[in-house]
Image (cartoon, helix red, strand yellow):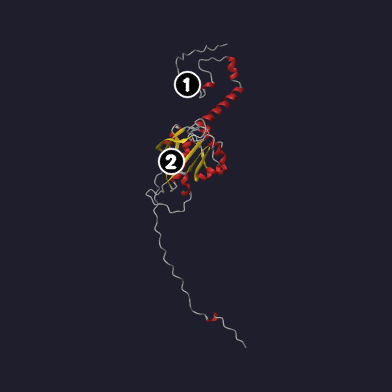
Amino acid sequence: MSTDPPPQLTEIGDQDWSALLRATSHDFASPSSTTSPAQHCQDASPSSSAAERVSTSKQKQSEERKSPNASVANLLTLTELRKAAWARIYSDGIKTGDATISTTRQPTWKQFDSLMFKRHRYIAVDPRDNRTLGWVACFDPFPQWSALHEDDWDSEPMETEDGRQGRTAEIQVMVAEGERARGVGAILVNAVMSSLNSDSRFSVVQAGYFTDSAAAGRLFAKCGFQVVSTTSNAVKMLDGPKRGAWRNLVIVQARLPPLEHQTKRPRQSSPTPTPPAIDMTINPKAVHKRPRLD
């Protein structure tokens, strides 16, 4: 009966073990810990293996959701059919105290729908489970002038060098609480910028955020916006932890590129068609004669 030679111990010294550990290292034993044979057999049981596979699967799904390289979202038009998702994400956004001047007051869908341009608003949905991630919309930055800027103009457009009419659109973007830091905000902002790019009415797109909202600053800088003004004590918080505090407001803008001028073909005056010749010859057989009265 042959016996296997005893295993030789290798001196590990200060080697780096990080490559052998999984992402969630707190779920596994450290290299310096030892495992008893009974515990090893217990860990190798089918039930523990199944639990480990489930845990690994959930961990992988969580990493995929947070991965910036994954297919993050599908864009859909934000309509009344999705007002429940809009309201939920709006509520998540204002809870932080850095989105609006209130952490509890939320407009109704009717108010939102009347202020936001219907043509330029989108909602992001996860392509795997149809989960709503965030939304973006545009509105007139000067509500008191909204009566002068109806969404459908019936006046003649002003001729400009870049082919645009000079209007400014302000955007508002909100992302669900559990979906942030995934690039959803950048997808939404770029989508609405692309939509506004094809609309000749608008020349400038702007947005506003509080000075202590670093995430908003990084988002708009990534999407090509530039800071144009910073106003001290611009707005006052109505409620929340910072109730009564005056907040500084940053305004960023991005100018839309000129439209491609389409060469207008001159209208060719069609020649007046010659009326067809009328035969004035009278056919005697076709003339109705008066009947003879005997």
Residue 285: percent from left, percent from top? 54, 81
Q: Nearer the viewer, residue 154 or 56?
A: 154
Q: In this view of the protein, can residue 132 be seen by the observer?
A: no
Residue at 41% from the left image edge and 40% from the top image edge: 253
Residue type, numbered disc 1:
Ser
Q: Which mark is residue 18?
A: 1
Front residue of 101 and 293: 101
The reply to whether dot 1 and dot 2 touch (C-beta < 8 Å) is no
Label number found at residue 206 = 2
Residue situated in front as seen by the camera: 80 or 238:
238
Q: Is residue 116 left or right of residue 49?
A: left
The secondary structure type at the circle numbered 1 is helix
Q: Separation of disc 1 and disc 2 at Cα?
A: 45 Å
Q: Position of residue 128 (x, y in %)?
A: 55, 36
Q: Residue at x 57, y 26 (%)?
A: 55
Q: Under tag 2, what secondary structure?
A: strand
- Mark 1 or 2, which is nearer the eye? 2
